[in-house]
Image (tube, coloured by chain):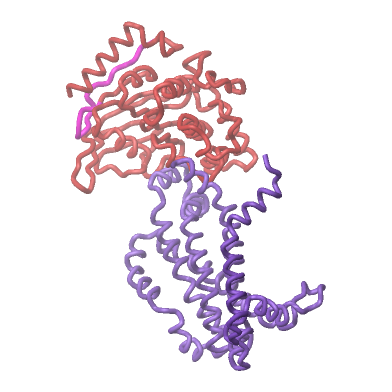
Chain colours: A purple, B red
């Protein structure tokens, strides 16, 4: 048996070699072309460090610029996503539990989901002005649908025999929801939440690009005005990294919470 | 304990499942219900459980008319994979109905472990149902019913989804927890019966059991009485007392002339309605 560190290293090489290769090719091509619009990765990383990671160690090397840029965007993203999550689960459960409510609400939901959220930004600007409430409104409006629709579907498709068992076990109302309906719908709820997290990141950037004094979107606008393609690239790379990290954290939580689901599915196949 | 008069049920699609069923079960009896497939056995059970409102007729459990799931009742379904909750551990599954008894958390847990010990599964309390074999999962479902200590226990084809050997073990387990089968309970085969308390104490002798099955031998082997239903729509065709001596065992009891005579009689009744 190979020692553990070596196996981990081996796995990392097996999975990451293409990424490394692409970076190397990009670096070489960009250096050779010398085009201002396409800086090499090393240049982008240097710009990122100058912009955001030049602070003191006591602040995890984050510069003031980083705090100004990251905190508003991440706060809007996470708060908007959380609000959309809570609203989506609550309304989704309500709709999923009642067949009448579902049939009444379905056309409304289909329409609401079909409206591209960015189309609402001018309207939200009029209503909320240019501040954080506007950004939150956009994020919540966009992120609520996947949670809501997945939750409603999950609640509607609980095994009839699980519901019978719950009744026979004397579970009603809140206990039925807590011990049977919500856990049974949890895999679908988590799917909705994960999709919503992606939407939230997209929408917070779009909303900030359209009108904001701070945040990563505003930083991109500033880079464009200052004609600093390297800073534009820095923002793009940063957003990609944020998306990856958020998704990885989410999957980590999902794996823990839905361990039973993975296990049960593995057993049944 | 259980009184059914003039019970009829017609589904929305017009299918008449049962018609005019009359049945009386005394406290502590184990009655099996057999009949050709589609004779409304499960419908009958669902009506008694309060899961389905019959189109006509009266059902009363312990003198009270059934309207919703009766208080003092437990059900073991055939499909254990969908009646146990995969997100709960074995112990939490067994403890779940005890909330209805108004017991404190610690007591619910203790009683769940007790019931698991009764079916020889106390070692698996911390696992999830899907980590167990089919027969073990059905034993968990039985433990869940036993932990509740119901006055009336309904079993809908409880051993229909397990292999033949496990089926015999589970039949003996049922006899053992009723206190009828003496020393060789099914749990004993698995070596987990050591903790079992006096079987009669735990949902045992006092419990009335209604068992639906399509297996004629099983209906005779476990029961005090066999009720045969006719084909759809189901009516009571015959009602046969089973006077086999206790303790019963898979080899000896099934070889008795009385057993052979009974199974022949039940078999004829099922096939010639």
Query: What residue appears at the point 27 percent right and 33 percent down from the top-left corner?
Result: B5
Point out residue B83 in the picture as x, y percentages from the top left corner: 44, 40
Query: What residue appears at the point 33 percent right and 71 percent down from the top-left corner?
Result: A107
Q: Nearer the viewer, residue A140 or A46?
A: A46
Instruction: Give the position of the N terminus of chain B as an image quadrant.
Output: top left
Residue most extreme to the top: B257
Residue most extreme to the front: A32
Q: Nearer the viewer, residue B221 or A215?
A: A215
Residue B243 lies in the magenta-colored region: yes
Q: Which residues are magenta?
A: B229-244
Q: Is residue B150 visible?
A: no
Q: Nearer the viewer, residue B48 or A123?
A: A123
Q: Is residue B217 visible?
A: yes
Query: What residue appears at the point 42 percent right and 25 percent down from the top-left corner?
Result: B27
Q: Give the vertical position of A146 relative to B6 (above or below).
A: below
Residue A45 lies in the magenta-colored region: no
Point out residue A128 in the picture as x, y percentages from the top left corner: 53, 88
Q: Is residue B114 left or right of residue B218?
A: right
Q: Give the vertical position of B177 relative to A262 (above or below).
A: above
Point out residue B175 in the picture as x, y percentages from the top left corner: 45, 20
Tally of numbered discs: 0
Query: What residue appears at the point 24 percent right and 28 percent down from the top-left corner?
Result: B36
Q: Is residue B264 left or right of residue A43?
A: left
Q: Is residue A155 left or right of residue B22?
A: right
Q: Is residue B243 left or right of residue A76?
A: left
Q: Give the vertical position of A269 relative to A256 (above or below).
A: above
Instruction: Give the position of the C terminus of chain B as an image quadrant.
Output: top left
Residue B44 quadrant:
top left
Point out residue B108 in the picture as x, y percentages from the top left corner: 60, 39
Q: Give the vertical position of A236 relative to B52 (above or below).
A: below
């Amino acid at each position: 048996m190979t020692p553990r560190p070596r196996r981990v290293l081996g796995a990392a090489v097996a999975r990451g070699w293409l990424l490394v290769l692409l970076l190397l090719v990009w670096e070489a091509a960009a250096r050779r072309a010398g085009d201002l619009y396409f800086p090499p990765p090393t240049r982008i990383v240097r710009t990122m460090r100058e912009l955001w990671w030049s602070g003191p160690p006591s602040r995890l090397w984050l510069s003031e610029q980083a705090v100004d840029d990251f905190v508003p965007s991440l706060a809007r993203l996470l708060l908007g996503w959380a609000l959309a999550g809570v609203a989506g689960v609550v309304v989704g459960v309500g709709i999923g539990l009642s067949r009448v409510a579902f049939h009444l609400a379905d056309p409304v939901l289909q329409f609401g989901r079909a409206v591209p959220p960015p189309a609402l930004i001018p309207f939200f600007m009029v209503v909320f002005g240019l501040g954080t409430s506007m950004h939150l409104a956009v994020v919540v409006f966009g992120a609520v649908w996947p949670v809501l629709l997945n939750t409603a579907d999950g609640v509607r498709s609980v095994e009839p025999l699980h519901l019978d068992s719950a009744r026979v076990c004397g579970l009603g109302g809140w206990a039925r929801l807590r011990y049977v309906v919500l856990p049974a719908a949890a895999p679908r709820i988590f799917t909705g939440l994960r999709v919503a997290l992606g939407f939230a990141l997209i929408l917070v950037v779009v909303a900030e690009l359209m009108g904001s004094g701070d945040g990563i979107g505003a930083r991109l606008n500033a880079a464009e005005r200052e004609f600093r393609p390297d800073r534009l690239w820095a923002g793009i790379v940063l957003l990609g990294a944020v998306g990856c990290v958020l998704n990885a954290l989410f999957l980590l939580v999902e794996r823990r919470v839905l361990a039973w689901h993975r296990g049960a599915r593995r057993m049944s196949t | 304990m259980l009184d059914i008069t003039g019970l009829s049920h017609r589904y929305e699609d017009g299918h008449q499942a049962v018609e005019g069923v009359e049945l009386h079960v005394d406290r502590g009896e184990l009655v099996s219900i057999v009949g050709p497939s589609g004779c409304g056995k499960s419908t009958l059970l669902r009506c008694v459980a309060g899961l389905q409102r019959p189109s006509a007729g009266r059902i009363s459990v312990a003198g009270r008319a059934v309207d919703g799931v009766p208080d003092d009742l437990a059900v073991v379904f055939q499909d254990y994979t969908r009646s146990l909750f995969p997100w709960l551990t074995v112990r939490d599954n067994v403890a779940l109905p005890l909330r209805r008894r108004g017991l404190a958390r610690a007591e619910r847990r203790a009683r769940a472990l007790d019931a698991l010990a009764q079916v020889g599964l106390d070692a698996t309390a911390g696992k999830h149902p899907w980590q167990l074999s089919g027969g073990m999962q059905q034993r968990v479902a039985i433990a869940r019913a036993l932990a509740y200590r119901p006055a009336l226990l309904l079993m809908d084809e409880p051993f229909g989804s397990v292999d033949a050997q496990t089926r015999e073990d589970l039949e003996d387990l049922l006899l053992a927890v009723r206190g009828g089968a003496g020393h060789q309970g099914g749990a004993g085969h698995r070596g987990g019966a050591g903790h079992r308390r006096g079987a009669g104490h735990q949902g045992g002798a006092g419990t009335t059991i209604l068992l639906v099955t399509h297996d004629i031998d099983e209906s005779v082997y476990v029961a005090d009485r066999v009720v045969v239903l006719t084909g759809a729509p189901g009516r009571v065709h015959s009602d046969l007392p089973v006077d086999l001596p206790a303790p019963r065992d898979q080899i000896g009891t099934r070889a008795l002339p009385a057993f052979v005579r009974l199974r022949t009689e039940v078999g004829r009744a099922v096939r010639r309605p």
